[in-house]
């Protein structure tokens, strides 16, 4: 394959796929049949993947694998900046921000930014509380 053909092939892979697999229970659709299968389990309650240690059941094998690490103590995601390790990549990414100072979650209402989404979510409650207080004041006048 020429480099041009490779580049074209790569671009094709990055284009959004048509979501032709439609859920019969709701309006969601998916690009892969396996994603639809996993989603349908949220409607049916089917949890075919069961933990051998505590019998907890999961809709997806990947969730079972992550859960099993609680029992085995496996922490495959290691921080490059310190000695900590984690059971999930997402937790490592969040932890790494304590070293880098990155704050990718920005409030749309003010200039504050946060290193984790939960921090932004908690902050947004402040804005919601202020708005409801203003509404209560307006109604009492």
Image: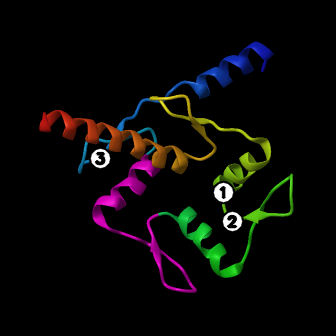
Tell me how far mark 3 sits from mark 2, CA to CA.
32 Å
First reached walking from the N terminus: tag 1 or tag 3: 3
Residue 39 disc label: none
Q: Residue shown at 39%/39% (left/top)?
A: 127
In the image, residue 19 sits, relative to residue 116, either above or below, namely: above
Dividing the picture into quadrants, the one containing residue 65 is bottom right
- Graded by Cα atoms within 10 Å as few (under 14), some (14 to 19) or many (20 or more), the crowding at tag 3 reads some
Please name which of the two marks, 1 or 3, marks the residue nearer to the observer. Answer: 1
Seen in the image, is 75 located left or right of residue 35?
right
Residue 91 disc label: 1
Q: Position of residue 2 (x, y in %)?
A: 79, 16
Tell me how far mark 2 sits from mark 1, CA to CA.
8 Å
Q: Residue shown at 55%/24% (left/top)?
A: 15
Tell me the residue that label 2 is attached to: 87
Dividing the picture into quadrants, the one containing residue 27 is top left
- Graded by Cα atoms within 10 Å as few (under 14), some (14 to 19) or many (20 or more), the crowding at tag 1 reads few
Q: Indicate the secondary structure of the residue bearing disc 3.
A: loop
Q: Indicate the secondary structure of the residue bearing disc 2.
A: loop
In the image, residue 6 sits, relative to residue 93, either above or below, namely: above
Quadrant including the N terminus:
top right
Please name which of the two marks, 3 or 2, marks the residue nearer to the observer. Answer: 2
Q: Position of residue 54 (x, y in %)?
A: 53, 86
Circles 2 and 1: CB atoms closer than 8 Å = yes
Q: Give the residues in magenta.
A: 33-59
Q: Indicate the secondary structure of the residue bearing disc 1.
A: helix
The structure's colour scheme is: rainbow
Tell me the residue that label 3 is attached to: 23
Is residue 49 rendered magenta in the image? yes
The mark tally for this picture is 3
């Amino acid at each position: 394959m020429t480099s041009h053909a490779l580049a074209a092939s790569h671009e094709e892979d990055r284009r959004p796929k048509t979501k032709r697999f439609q859920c019969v229970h709701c309006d969601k659709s998916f690009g892969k049949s396996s994603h639809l299968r996993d989603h349908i389990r949220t409607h049916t309650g089917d949890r075919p993947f069961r933990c051998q240690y505590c019998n907890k059941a999961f809709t997806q094998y990947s969730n079972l694998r992550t859960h099993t690490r609680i029992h085995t103590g496996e922490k495959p995601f290691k921080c490059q900046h310190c000695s900590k390790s984690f059971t999930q990549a997402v937790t490592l990414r969040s932890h790494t921000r304590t070293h880098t100072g990155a704050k990718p979650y920005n409030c749309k209402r003010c200039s504050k930014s946060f290193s984790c989404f939960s921090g932004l979510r908690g902050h947004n409650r402040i804005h919601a509380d202020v708005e409801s207080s203003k509404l209560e004041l307006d109604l009492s006048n």
